[in-house]
């Protein structure tokens, strides 16, 4: 069931939709560089302390963002898909880039009021759309941090997290 968080007709955003998209895509650029930094043979197999390999973490981000942007736009949420996003680094990066383009294409179609609406993401997570978006970014940062630990354990300097260009 969708309801409005705010009943007012005027919006006073803390951040504009355009600025949020730029912020999110900046994080996605950094995460893409983390994927690129992994040696092919370690991307799908290396882990520390029983955590999932980074390819699985990147797949989660892809599988969340692609149907997530659809659900945010339409209010129709597909169930979360856990299937692999690729079996090679090249395939994983291609999927990443396709989702990035999809986000850029669909984002401008989202009405501003939609960000304040409650919805049930993936049929199980209820809350305002802006909260769902914040979760997407938080989840990505969390998993990217795991990737940084893996890269350092492999003796590889991770890309600087502050460079989102």
Image (cartoon, grey):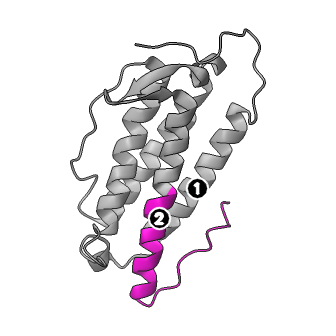
**To which quarter of the image does residue 4 belong?**
top right
| Figure check: 157 above or below 81 | below
Image quadrant occupied by the C terminus: bottom right
State yes or no: residue 145 in magenta: yes
Q: Which mark is residue 27?
A: 1
Pointer 2: residues within 10 angstroms few (<14), some, or many (20+)? many
**To which quarter of the image does residue 155 belong?**
bottom left
Where is residue 65? Give x, y as percent: 43, 41
Q: Which mark is residue 144?
A: 2
Mark sitting earlier along the chain (1/2): 1
Q: Which residues are magenta?
A: 141-165
> SS for tag 1?
helix
Q: Residue at x 53, y 78 (%)?
A: 158
Marks 1 & 2, CB-CB < 8 Å contact: yes
| Figure check: 21 above or below 109 | below
Residue 95 seen in render: no
């Amino acid at each position: 069931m969708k309801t409005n968080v705010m009943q007012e007709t005027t919006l006073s955003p803390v951040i504009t939709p355009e600025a949020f998209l730029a912020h999110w895509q900046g994080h996605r650029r950094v995460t893409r560089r983390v994927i690129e930094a992994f040696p092919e043979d370690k991307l799908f197999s290396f882990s520390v302390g029983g955590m999932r390999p980074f390819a699985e973490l990147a797949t989660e981000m892809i599988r969340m963002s692609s149907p997530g942007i659809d659900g945010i736009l339409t209010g129709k949420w597909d169930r979360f898909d856990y299937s692999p996003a690729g079996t090679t680094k090249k395939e994983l990066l291609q999927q990443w880039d396709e989702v990035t383009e999809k986000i850029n294409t669909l984002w401008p179609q989202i009405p501003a009021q939609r960000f304040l609406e409650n919805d049930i993401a993936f049929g199980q997570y209820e809350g305002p759309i802006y909260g769902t978006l914040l979760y997407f970014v938080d989840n990505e940062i969390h998993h990217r941090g795991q990737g940084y630990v893996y890269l350092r354990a492999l003796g590889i300097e991770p890309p600087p997290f502050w460079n989102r260009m």
